Image: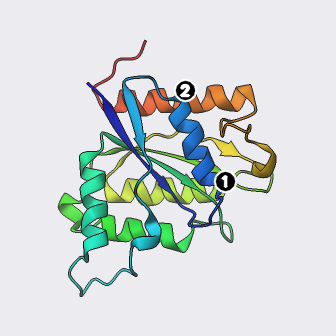
Amino acid sequence: MTMRVLGVSGSIRRGSFNRRLLMAAAAELPGAATLDLSFRIDRIPPYDEDAPAPEPVRAMRAAIAAADAVLIATPEYNSSVPGQLKNALDWASRPFPANALRHKPVAVVGASTGMFGAIWAQAELRKVLRTTGAEVIDDELAVGWAHDAFAPDNTLADPQQRAALAALLERLLVATGAVCRA
C-alpha cells in the first residue's frame, strides 16, 4: 500500500527554499510513500466566512482529505506564519466540526535565510494546526542559512539535517497508523 503525503509550501516565491525542503523530504521518504507537491496555496482566495467555498478551496480540502498525512514547509515572515498559508488553513479548517485537517497527521518544517530556520513560524503553525484538530507531530526541523543548505540535487547538504528529516517523516508516517516503527 502506498502512503500519500500532501506537501504544502508556505511560500509562493519562485525558487522557494521551502519548496526545495519539500523536495528534500520526498527524497527521504521510504519507498512505500510518495509526496504530492501539486497543491499550491497561491490559488486560494482570501477567506470569507459569508461566501461558499470556491473551487480552489474545495480542491484543497479534497487533497487534504485524500492524503494519509500532510507535511508543511514554511518560511517565517515578521516572526510568524506567512499570510497566504494562514489563509489556506483558515479555509481548510471549515466547517470546523468536520474539517479536512481534523485527525489528520501533520508535520511542520521550515527553512529561512536567517540562522533560526523559521522556528517561530513553525511553532505558530503547530498551534494553529492543533486548534483545527490535526494530529500534530511535535518534532521540528529548522533549516537556517537556507541559501547554503541544499545540495545541487535538492537534498539537504548536512547529513545530520537529512537524518533529522528522515526521522521526522518516519514519525509522521507512523502517526497515520498504517506504518509500524522499525
Work out whether mark 1 precedes mark 2 in sequence or the reverse, and give the earlier one. 1
Judging by the rendered image, the residue that carries numbered circle 2 is 167
Check the picture and name the quadrant holding the C terminus. Answer: top left
Q: Nearer the viewer, residue 127 or 115?
A: 115
Q: Amino acid at mark 1?
A: Phe
Q: Amino acid at mark 2?
A: Ala
Q: Nearer the viewer, mark 1 or mark 2?
A: 1
Residue that appears at 54% across and 61% down: 10
Separation (CA) of disc 1 from disc 2 = 20 Å
User: Relative to 68, is 153 on the left or the right?
Assistant: right
Q: Position of residue 1 (x, y in %)?
A: 25, 24
- Whether residue 55 is situated above or below residue 169 in the rendered picture: below
Outermost top residue: 182
Outermost bottom residue: 50
User: Relative to 41, is 121 on the left or the right?
Assistant: right
User: Relative to 53, is 32 on the left or the right?
Assistant: right
Q: Position of residue 51 (x, y in %)?
A: 24, 86
Q: Position of residue 153 (x, y in %)?
A: 67, 36
Residue that appears at 36% across and 24% down: 32
Residue that appears at 39% across and 65% down: 89
User: Relative to 68, is 77 on the left or the right?
Assistant: right
Judging by the rendered image, the residue that carries numbered circle 1 is 17
Q: Nearer the viewer, residue 155 or 136?
A: 155
